[in-house]
Image (cartoon, grey):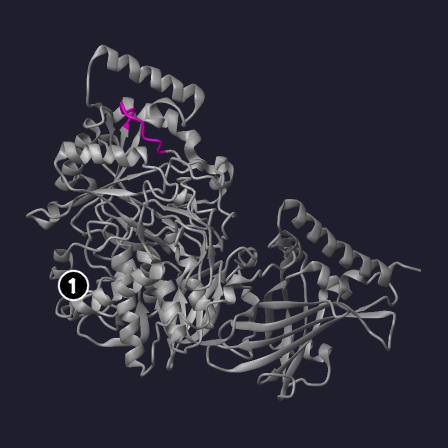
């Protein structure tokens, strides 16, 4: 499977639809809107991971952990495992191409009917529930969930599943195998992606390195790619602005070094924007947009829910569980661990909806297993409650603990530990808000709601059936004010009939005021943020069903035909898209620009300086293959960024379609070389300019290597290219401080390993240094 994402240097200035985020909502939006014939751009904050690239050790997993809260959040921070530290509740979610589908437990379960009948939903959904069910059916067809095939095709009956059967019988509650988004046979799937069968390694929630997990990166996203969607990763969308009939989507490219120069945000223009950054991400973007003047409902950020999530442990049971993932020890052979979650004790059908819950088993992913033995011993002493007694039982438990401590998590007490994930119904009264520009969650005391005592009792009963020690969520204690952790954040942009009660309407379109039903044309939210209440079980199928429903309605309102046929355009993603190792760097140059001076660069500079007409750019230069770059006689790379020129626009302009040429030979003057810069500039006001610059590399009298390599002579034209009216000329230079910052931004991209990256950077440095020596020092 090749990568789906493109280099950000290839982004266009305008799309019919910009989708922000690539979880279930965003991937569905990209697939369906591109199938409807629209030009689609998907922007994802996280990186793209292919099977085999996910962390499989504690060291590599730690590098992907991003803790957000307090002073730790930065515009350039990124990691696959994202933890948001809130007041009363903390959130774990995934950040990568595929969103949380990359790190969830794959469970597809339909909501209990009474959930969708609740008056918190818009009337249009409650009175036409068939449209929601049709959306669920479409999502089911794409995600292809299936139960774990125990006892078939070489897949064993799992110890943890047998333990759940025993717990369910003891509790007199219904047990069943769950439908999970996992492939259990080697095949090419319905969108042309080749997938390997599940090996039962148990590492679903740190990322599937086998390729068996049906994340959105295996279905909806390749489908969007096949239908022309352009996908860009490591793009941190900050806010939106309405401009005439279009939307400006402001973003920061992550990892290119622009923050070192305090550079302004870039933007892309769109007729329609679909926010799918998840409950936290979409809410944060709208909150920041509201701070920048966008009119939205005062309900924004409210009705946040953790979906009643509770984590617990049945520690050191009398029966084996085998609930520890293999990590780096995984092989192609089918193991005895199993997918993360395979079964459920379903307690949703109780007389009172809010008293219902689902209790599922899970696995600890292999990359973090080394932390588990000592942690569980500590938690069992602090908050554990043993469910059985007796001296012999006590001795066996201690012996198992010693085995785990000295032999590791595959032995002893940890081998006998069941992990529980429970989902129920909290009161859904959490709130998200911006504090000093950073998203915060405020829901102090949520863990003291009575429902969580009931959940604690059910975990105790499930553990008692197995003879273990019940351990609650480690943060659910008096010392930590009974704080919760959720992996299913919902709400913040809740659906409603009007703006007084919610943020979006039944199809996710954003209300344009704090009351009434007026809507922003072309602005939608399509993810878990729109769900107005907890669903009491894994929400991915609810989210997906709503997103499919919204896309169908939006396409009809646009007068477009939306085909769901799999027979066309499904083979493009199966070929190898490997590229070489590239190099990128970011530079800032500053100077002056003389508007109206069309004859001389120096005169333009002096005119601009006298009139305080400053000109500044911050550009990222990127080559995909350093070897091809050096071999190419034009030594050409791509370039994007921003330019500030008050004489042309009152706001920072985005520079796209840029071309950079490094040390190009001059056939008519062999002793001179040239560096070239060209780019199209797009202003917020809607104007377009063409930028052209060059550095003249020539060994004239004196030591001028610094001046030649850091002075850029610039021209700006009206329109899309140099055939337009020449508006002025000027000159830019690199300051010493900016040059030192620039050096910190030089890095290899898509290197196969660290050594390959060092070789690429070294090759670039050798090429640059060799040309400087040849021009200025060679006799």
Residue 451 location, quadrant: top left
Label 1 crowding class (10 Å Cα cut-off): few <14, some 14-19, many 20+?
A: many
Main secondary structure type of the part rendered in magenta: loop
Q: Is residue 614 magenta?
A: no
Residue 370 appears in which quarter of the rendering? Answer: top left
Residue 378 horizontal/vertical position (percent): 33, 24
Q: Is residue 312 left or right of residue 254?
A: left
Q: Residue placed farthest to the right in the image?
A: 779
Residue 761 point in image, percent of width and height: 69, 52
Image point (29%, 17%), residue name: 397
Q: Secondary structure at mark 1?
A: loop
Residue at 49 percent of width and 41 percent of height: 332
Q: Which residue is the site of mark 1?
A: 121
Find residue 632 and report its horizontal and vertical position in percent.
75, 67
Evaluate whether residue 295 shows in this view: no
- x and y, in percent, of residue 756 in the image: 67, 49
Is 631 located above or below residue 593 in the figure?
A: above
Span highlighted in magenta in the image: 315-323
């Amino acid at each position: 499977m090749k990568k789906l994402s493109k280099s950000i240097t290839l982004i266009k200035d305008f799309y019919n639809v910009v989708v922000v985020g690539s979880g279930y909502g965003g991937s569905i939006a990209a697939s369906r809107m591109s199938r409807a014939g629209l030009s689609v751009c998907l922007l994802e904050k996280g990186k793209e991971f292919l099977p085999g690239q996910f962390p499989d050790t504690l060291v590599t997993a730690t590098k992907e952990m991003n803790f957000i809260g307090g002073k730790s959040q930065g515009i350039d921070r990124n990691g696959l495992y994202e933890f948001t530290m809130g007041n009363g509740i903390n959130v774990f979610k995934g950040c990568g191409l595929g969103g949380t589908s990359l790190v969830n437990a794959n469970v597809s379960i339909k909501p209990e009917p009474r959930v969708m009948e609740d008056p918190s939903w818009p009337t249009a959904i409650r009175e036409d529930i068939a449209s929601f069910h049709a959306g669920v059916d479409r999502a089911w067809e794409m995600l292809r969930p299936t139960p774990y095939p125990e006892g078939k095709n070489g897949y064993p009956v799992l110890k943890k599943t047998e333990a759940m059967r025993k717990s369910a019988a003891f509790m007199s509650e219904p047990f069943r195998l769950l439908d999970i988004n996992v492939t259990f046979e080697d095949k090419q799937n319905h969108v042309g992606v080749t997938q390997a069968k599940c090996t039962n390694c148990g590492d679903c929630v740190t990322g599937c390195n086998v390729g068996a997990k049906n994340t959105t990166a295996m279905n909806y996203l390749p489908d969007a790619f096949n239908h022309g969607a352009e996908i860009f990763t490591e793009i941190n969308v900050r806010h939106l602005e309405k401009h005439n009939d279009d939307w400006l989507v402001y973003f920061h490219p992550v990892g290119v070094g622009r923050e070192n120069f305090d550079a302004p945000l870039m933007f892309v223009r769109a007729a329609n924007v679909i926010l799918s950054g998840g409950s936290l991400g979409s809410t944060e973007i709208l909150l920041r947009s509201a701070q920048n003047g966008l009119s939205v409902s005062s309900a924004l950020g409210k009705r946040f829910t953790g979906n009643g999530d509770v984590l617990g442990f049945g520690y050191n049971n009398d029966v084996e569980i085998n609930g520890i993932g293999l990590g780096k020890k995984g092989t192609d052979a089918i193991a005895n661990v199993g997918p993360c979650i395979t079964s459920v004790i379903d307690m949703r059908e109780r007389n009172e909806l809010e008293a219902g819950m689902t209790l599922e088993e899970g696995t600890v992913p292999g990359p973090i297993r080394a932390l588990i033995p000592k942690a569980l011993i500590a938690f069992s002493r602090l908050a554990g409650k043993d469910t059985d007694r007796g001296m012999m039982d006590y001795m066996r438990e201690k012996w198992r603990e010693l085995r785990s401590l000295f032999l590791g998590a595959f032995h002893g007490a940890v081998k006998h530990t069941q992990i529980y994930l429970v989902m129920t119904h909290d009161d859904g009264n959490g709130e998200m808000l911006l504090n000093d520009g950073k998203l915060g969650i405020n829901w102090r005391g949520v863990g003291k709601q009575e429902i969580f005592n009931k959940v604690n009792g059910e975990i105790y009963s499930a553990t008692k059936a197995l003879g273990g020690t019940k351990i609650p969520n480690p943060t659910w204690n008096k010392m930590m004010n009974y704080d919760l952790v959720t992996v299913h954040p919902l709400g913040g942009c809740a659906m409603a009939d009007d703006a007084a009660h919610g943020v979006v309407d039944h199809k996710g379109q954003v209300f344009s005021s704090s009351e009434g039903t007026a809507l922003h044309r072309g602005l939608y939210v399509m993810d878990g943020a729109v769900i107005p209440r907890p669903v009491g079980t894994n929400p991915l199928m609810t989210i997906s069903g709503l997103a499919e429903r919204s896309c169908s309605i939006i396409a009809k309102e646009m007068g477009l035909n939306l085909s769901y046929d799999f027979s066309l355009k499904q083979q493009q993603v199966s070929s190898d898209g490997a590229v070489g190792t590239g190099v990128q760097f970011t530079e800032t140059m500053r100077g002056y620009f003389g508007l109206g001076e069309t004859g001389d660069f120096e005169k333009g500079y002096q005119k601009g300086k006298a009139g305080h007409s400053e000109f500044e750019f911050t550009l990222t230069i990127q080559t995909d293959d350093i070897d091809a770059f050096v071999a190419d006689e034009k030594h050409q790379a791509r370039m994007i960024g921003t330019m500030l020129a008050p004489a042309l626009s009152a706001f920072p302009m985005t520079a796209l379609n840029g071309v950079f040429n490094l040390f190009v030979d001059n056939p008519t003057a062999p002793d001179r070389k040239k560096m070239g810069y060209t780019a199209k500039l797009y202003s917020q006001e809607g104007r377009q300019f063409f930028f052209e610059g060059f550095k003249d590399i020539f060994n004239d009298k004196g030591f001028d290597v610094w001046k030649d390599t850091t002075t850029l002579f610039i021209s700006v034209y009206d329109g899309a290219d140099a055939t337009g009216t020449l508006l002025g000329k000027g000159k830019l230079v690199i300051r010493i401080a900016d040059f030192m910052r620039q050096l910190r931004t030089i890095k290899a991209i898509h290197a196969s390993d660290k050594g390959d990256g060092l070789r690429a950077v070294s090759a670039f440095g050798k090429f640059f240094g060799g040309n400087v020596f040849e021009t200025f020092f060679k006799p």
